[in-house]
Amino acid sequence: MKIVILHGQRHNGSTRHIAEQVVGLVAGPADEIEHFYFVENKACIGCFGCILRGEEACPHFEENQPVLAALHEADLIVLESPCYCMGISGQLKIFLDHMAWRWMVHRPDKTMFHKVGLVVSTAAGAGTGKVTKDLAQQLFYWGVPKVYRIGLSVNAASWEEVSPKNVPRLIAKRQPVQQNCTAS
């Protein structure tokens, strides 16, 4: 199995920690796991080149090509983002903006119809429900039929600050629950 994880941040925080623990539960020793971080990616300029003329017309196509190739080969796609200001991290959102051409209403990719998605978000407080819903909708629009969501309030600014008494509660909740992805 090939697993692709798109990280919404560069640091090893609570969201990344939970996502990698869950992936560790499903990945076998022979499985390939590929990680992508979006640090210096350029923002979509809204030129519609990808939609009207093909993704190769995007001025940032070369920058995104390694991720596109990995997504094409993946069996499991993991999108993980901490809740930043009640939303997806800007770094991951910039990449997702580049994927508008992939949406079912534009140019569906039949390889997506057989993949599984997992979305993960943590927050010090509220907001993970909105983030996981937004990320799950992206995968739904790509044509991914099964998407699982994990949203956890860790009540801390970093994984190291999570109270030891809360760790068993978080570990018990980390099992993904399939959610119906709707365009609502």
Image (tube, rainbow, N blue to C red):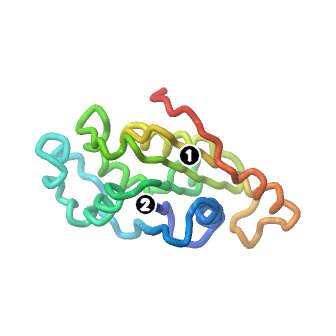
Residue 154: image quadrant is: bottom right
> Exactly how many numbered labels are in the figure?
2
Between 136 and 45, the residue placed more toward the observer is 136
Q: Amino acid at mark 1?
A: Val
Residue 180: image quadrant is: top right
Q: Where does the image place residue 12, in percent across and percent down from the top left?
A: 59, 72
On screen, residue 9 above or below 146:
below
On screen, residue 94 above or below 14:
above
Query: Looking at the rendered structure, which numbered label has been put on residue 91?
Result: 2
Q: Mark 2 or mark 1: which comes first in sequence? A: 2
**Location of mark 1 (residue):** 131
Q: Where does the image place residue 135, in percent across and percent down from the top left?
A: 49, 45
Query: Looking at the rendered structure, which numbered label has been put on residue 79?
Result: none
Q: Are marks 2 and 1 in contact (CB under 8 Å)?
A: no
159 horizontally vs 143: left or right:
right
On screen, residue 10 above or below 151:
below
- Residue at (37% x, 38% y) in the render: 143
Badge 1 element? helix
